[in-house]
Image (cartoon, rainbow, N blue to C red):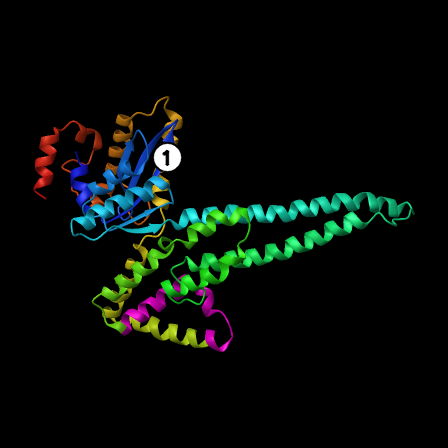
């Protein structure tokens, strides 16, 4: 029943799916409040099932998902219906968390290939070294071992190239560049176009395919538009963004080159202004909060998934009713630590419940709760 009051308040959402046996559970979280807004044990996870959920969130502007076929199809169907009704489609960001995870897996495979080739070369050289120590000739016996060494050298050079390319690709998925500048859609796409060709082989196919999708960089376009729309002085906004970039890359202030010294001087002046100018303090706070709440990863829904998996391990059978009960408990409980401390997901999303205790709240009649919440 409470879903009818939480769904109109969801503008950003992270969505995913997990399985109980062969049955999928469709999951959704509102990231700012950490409110668990979708938790359905469904018959399937196709596009129609997901579209039904996306349609239920009338105010949803932005969704973060992985590259699951059902999720992408559901978003497409829901966005098409909105456009037919004269409304804006749902913006979609491809989850950075899953992209980096997949790339990390591919890099480990690449790295293990080098170590495997090195072991094979060592195995070929070991009996030859023993023969050398015994004073025996190695004539016409070293060709396979030398070929193995050359292969190791080639694989090592390729791995170094791949490692450098992957680091560059990862930097394109960050809010700020290594130089402390706010990343832009154009700069990130140019960097990806430059470095993705170095990620070769079957192990990198999935990662490259995900990074080539425009949705991988939606978050950069979104933050640029939101910053531009802020009713702030343009120079103050730029200075606030620059301060945030330095805060996230403090190593930029430690060098002894001309650029680092100039940056330290600017940072000292900006810090003094921040301590004395209340207007600038407000600008920095607004910009920092905007960047923090512009979501690019579905890590929060993965956190809820881990809660469900833990409960799945405790219970013999996880039913739809039990999932609803756990979702209700999660949304009513207050966080003990973090920036959401002493608040519950329902409170953070804007719902003031008549009773704090979730067990006592369960005893109330739905119409009674609906009547009280409708007055808010």
Asked if one can make out residue 206 in the rendered structure from this viewpoint, the answer is yes
Residue projecting furthest to the front: 84
168 lies left or right of 1:
right
Q: Residue at x 19, y 37 (%)?
A: 3
Image quarter where the C terminus lies is: top left
Query: Observer-nearest residue: 375 or 168?
Result: 168
Task: Write down the region rendered in magenta.
Answer: 235-260
Judge whether 132 appears above or below 321 on screen.
below
User: How packed is label 1: few (under 14 Cα within 10 Å), some, or many (20 or more)?
Assistant: some
Give the x, y percent position of residue 21.
39, 26
Judge whether 82 appears above or below 368 on screen.
below
Query: Observer-nearest residue: 234 or 24?
Result: 24
Residue projecting furthest to the right: 135
| Magenta stretch: dominant secondary structure | helix
Quarter of the image for residue 184 reads bottom left
Judge whether 153 appears above or below 300 on screen.
below
Residue projecting furthest to the top: 316
Tell me if residue 298 is in the magenta stretch.
Answer: no
Image quarter where the N terminus lies is: top left
Asked if one can make out residue 344 in the rendered structure from this viewpoint, the answer is no
Q: Secondary structure at mark 1?
A: strand
Give the x, y percent position of residue 61.
24, 51
Give the x, y percent position of residue 47.
30, 39
Tell me if residue 253 is in the magenta stretch.
Answer: yes
Quarter of the image for residue 312 reads top left
Q: Residue at x 51, y 49 (%)?
A: 204
Give the x, y percent position of residue 171.
45, 59
Residue hosting label 1: 18
Q: How many callouts does the rendering have?
A: 1
Q: Residue at x 33, y 51 (%)?
A: 93
């Amino acid at each position: 029943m409470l879903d009818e009051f939480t769904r109109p308040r969801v503008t950003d959402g992270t969505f995913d799916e997990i399985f109980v046996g062969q049955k999928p559970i469709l999951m959704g979280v509102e990231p700012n409040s950490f409110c668990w807004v979708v938790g359905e044990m469904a018959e399937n996870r196709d596009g129609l099932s997901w579209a039904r959920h996306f349609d239920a969130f009338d105010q949803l502007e932005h969704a973060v998902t992985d590259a699951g076929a059902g999720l992408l199809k559901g978003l497409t169907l829901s966005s098409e219906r909105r456009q037919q009704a004269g409304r804006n489609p749902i913006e979609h960001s491809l989850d950075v968390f899953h992209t980096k995870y997949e790339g990390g897996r591919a890099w480990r495979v690449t790295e293990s290939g080098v170590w495997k080739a090195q072991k094979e070369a060592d195995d070929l050289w070991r009996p030859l070294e023993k023969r050398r120590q015994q004073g025996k000739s190695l004539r016409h016996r070293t060709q396979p071992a030398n070929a193995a060494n050359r292969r190791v050298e080639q694989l090592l050079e390729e791995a170094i190239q791949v490692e450098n390319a992957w680091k560059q690709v990862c930097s394109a998925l960050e809010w700020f560049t290594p130089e402390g500048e706010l990343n832009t859609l154009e700069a990130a796409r140019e960097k990806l176009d430059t470095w993705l060709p170095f990620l070769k082989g079957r192990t990198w196919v999935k990662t490259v395919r995900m990074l080539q999708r425009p949705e991988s960089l939606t978050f950069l376009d979104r933050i640029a538009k939101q910053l531009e729309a802020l009713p702030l002085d343009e120079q103050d906004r730029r200075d606030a963004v620059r301060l945030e970039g330095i805060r996230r890359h403090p190593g930029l202030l430690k060098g002894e080159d001309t650029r680092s010294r100039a940056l330290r001087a600017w940072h000292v002046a900006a810090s003094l202004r921040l301590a004395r100018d209340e207007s600038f303090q407000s600008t920095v706070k607004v910009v920092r909060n905007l960047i923090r709440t512009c979501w690019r990863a579905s890590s929060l829904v993965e956190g809820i998934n881990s809660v469900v998996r833990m409960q799945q391990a405790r219970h013999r059978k996880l039913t739809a009713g039990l999932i609803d009960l756990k979702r209700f408990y999660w949304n009513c409980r207050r966080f003990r630590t973090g920036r959401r401390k002493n608040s519950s997901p329902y409170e953070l999303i804007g719902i003031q419940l008549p009773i704090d205790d979730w067990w006592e709240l369960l005893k109330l009649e739905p119409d009674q709760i609906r009547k009280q919440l409708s007055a808010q």
